[in-house]
Amino acid sequence: MSEAAAAEVHGHGAVADQYEPSLTPGNSGKLGMWTFLAGDAMTFGAGIAAYGALRYQNVNWPDPADWLGISLTAVMTFILICSSVTMVEALSGITHGNIAKMQRFLGLTVLGGIAFLGCQAYEWHHLIWGEHLSIKTSLFSATFFILTGFHGLHVTGGVIYLGTLLMHSFQRAYTVADAKLIEIAGLYWHFVDLVWILIFTFVYLI
C-alpha cells in the first residue's frame, strides 16, 4: 500500500474514531445526571429504610397525624407535582422551538419550588418553635427533620439550577439544540418530585 493510501485509510480511521457514537442514547451530561441520581436514590432509600426500621421496632412511635400538618403537606405535594407538569411543558416548548413557552413554564417551575420551600420553612418553624415537636426529644423528630431537610436541600439546589438556566436563556438565545440542557434539568426535578411522594407516603401518611 502506498504512503498516500495508508494516510488516507488512517485519516478515515481517525474520523471514524472521532465521530463514534456514545454508548448511551443521550450525551455525557445525561449519563452524568443518571449516575448522580442513582447514587442519590440509594441515599434516600437508606434514609427511608432506616426510618421504617426505627418505627417498626418502637411500639411508642407517635401517629404522624397527631404531630404533622397533613393538610399543609398535601398542598406542598400538589405544588411539587404541578411543578413537574410545568417542567414537562418547558421541555416541550424548547423541543418545538418555542423558547418563550420554555421560559414561561421554566419560570413557573422555579416558582413552584420556591412555594414548596416556603411551606416547608413554615412547617419547620411551627414544629421547632411551636408546642408540637422538638428535634431533641425523639427518634421520630430526628428522622423526620433529616429526611425532609435533605430533600429540602435538593429542592433548593433544583431552584438554583433551573433559575440559572432560565436567566441564561435570556442572556443567550436558546435554540432547539439546547433542549438537552432542559431535558437533563428535568431528570433532576422529576427525581426530586418522586422522592417527595415517597417521603410524604411513608413519613406523613402511613
Image: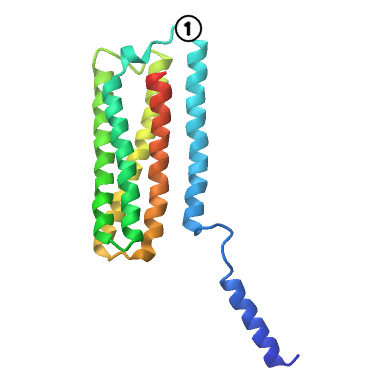
Q: Position of residue 159 (x, y in %)?
A: 30, 44
Q: Residue furthest right?
A: 1
Would residue 161 be seen by someone viewing this image from the given angle?
A: no
Q: Is residue 21 above or below residue 44?
A: below
Q: Quadrant of residue 158?
A: top left
Density class for disc 1 (Cα within 10 Å; few <14, some 14-19, many ≥20) is few
Residue 43 seen in the figure:
yes
- Which residue is more in the foreground, 88 or 158? 88
> Of all residues shown, which one is farthest toward the top?
60
Query: Which residue occupies 30% across, 41% down?
Result: 83
Which quarter of the figure is the C terminus placed in?
A: top left
Residue 73 in which image quadrant = top left
The residue under the point 52% across, 18% down is: 53
Residue at (38, 11) in percent of width and height: 63
Three-letter residue code for mark 1: Val
Kindly identify the residue that appears in the image at 39 percent across and 31 percent down: 197
Q: Nearer the viewer, residue 100 or 170?
A: 100
| Mark 1, residue position | 59
The picture quadrant where one finds residue 61 is: top left
Callout count: 1
Q: Position of residue 5 (x, y in %)?
A: 69, 90
Q: Mark 1: which secondary structure? A: loop
Residue 95 pos. (x, y %)? 36, 60
Of 32 and 191, which appears nearest the observer? Answer: 191
Q: Quadrant of the N terminus?
A: bottom right
Residue 54 drawn at (x, y percent):
50, 16
Nearest the camera: 163 or 178? 178
